[in-house]
C-alpha cells in the first residue's frame, strides 16, 4: 500500500512541476512578444521597409511606383500592380496618348 502512495505522490509532484513549467513558459513567451513588438521597426512613409533608405518614385506604364536605390526593392500601393498588369498589354499608341494626356494635366 505504501508503494501505491509513493507512486501517487510522485505523479502529483511531476504534475505540479509540469504546470509550473507551463506557467513560466507562457510568461516567457508573453515577455518575448512584448519585447519584439517594442523593437520591431515601424514602417515609415518614404523609407524602404527593408533597409531604411529613402524611396525614389519612378514611372512604370503611367503608375508611380516606389523603388529603393540601395536594395532595388520595388514597393507598390494598393491597386498599382493590377493597373500595371492591365496596361502591359496595351499597344504603343495607347501609351503614347496617355503620356500626352498626363503632360497636359
Image (tube, rainbow, N blue to C red):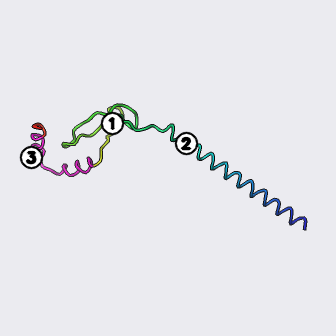
Which dot, 2 or 1, sits closer to the camera? 2
Q: Residue at x 74, y 53 (%)?
A: 17
Q: Position of residue 15 (x, y in %)?
A: 74, 58
Q: Find residue 93 and name its label.
A: 3
Q: Residue at x 70, y 55 (%)?
A: 19
Count of numbered marks: 3
Q: Secondary structure at mark 1?
A: loop
Q: Is residue 94 left or right of residue 47?
A: left
Q: Earlier in the sequence, mark 1 or mark 3?
A: 1
Q: Residue at x 78, y 59 (%)?
A: 12
Q: Is residue 23 left or right of residue 80?
A: right
In terms of depth relative to the viewer, which is nearer, 88 or 104?
Answer: 104
Question: Where, quadrant-wise, is the N terminus in this rendering?
Answer: bottom right
Q: Is the residue marked by circle 1 packed among few (<14), some (14-19), or many (20+) residues within 10 Å?
A: few
Residue bounds of the magenta highlight = 79-101
Q: Is residue 36 left or right of residue 58?
A: right
Q: Secondary structure at mark 2?
A: helix
Question: Where, quadrant-wise, is the C terminus in this rendering?
Answer: top left
Which dot, 2 or 3, sits closer to the camera? 2
Q: Determine whether 91 is above or below 43 in the image.
A: below
- The residue wearing badge 2 is 34
Q: Position of residue 46 (x, y in %)?
A: 33, 34
Q: Is the residue marked by circle 3 packed among few (<14), some (14-19), or many (20+) residues within 10 Å?
A: few
| Magenta-colored stretch includes residue 85 | yes
Amino acid at each position: 500500500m505504501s508503494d501505491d502512495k509513493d507512486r501517487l505522490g510522485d505523479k502529483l509532484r511531476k504534475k505540479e512541476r509540469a504546470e509550473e513549467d507551463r506557467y513560466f513558459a507562457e510568461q516567457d513567451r508573453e515577455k518575448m512578444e512584448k519585447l519584439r513588438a517594442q523593437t520591431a521597426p515601424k514602417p515609415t512613409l518614404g523609407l524602404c521597409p527593408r533597409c531604411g533608405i529613402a524611396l525614389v518614385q519612378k514611372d512604370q506604364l503611367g503608375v508611380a511606383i516606389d523603388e529603393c536605390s540601395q536594395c532595388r526593392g520595388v514597393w507598390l500601393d494598393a491597386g498599382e500592380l493590377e493597373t500595371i498588369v492591365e496596361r502591359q498589354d496595351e499597344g504603343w499608341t495607347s501609351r503614347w496618348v496617355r503620356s500626352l494626356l498626363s503632360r497636359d494635366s
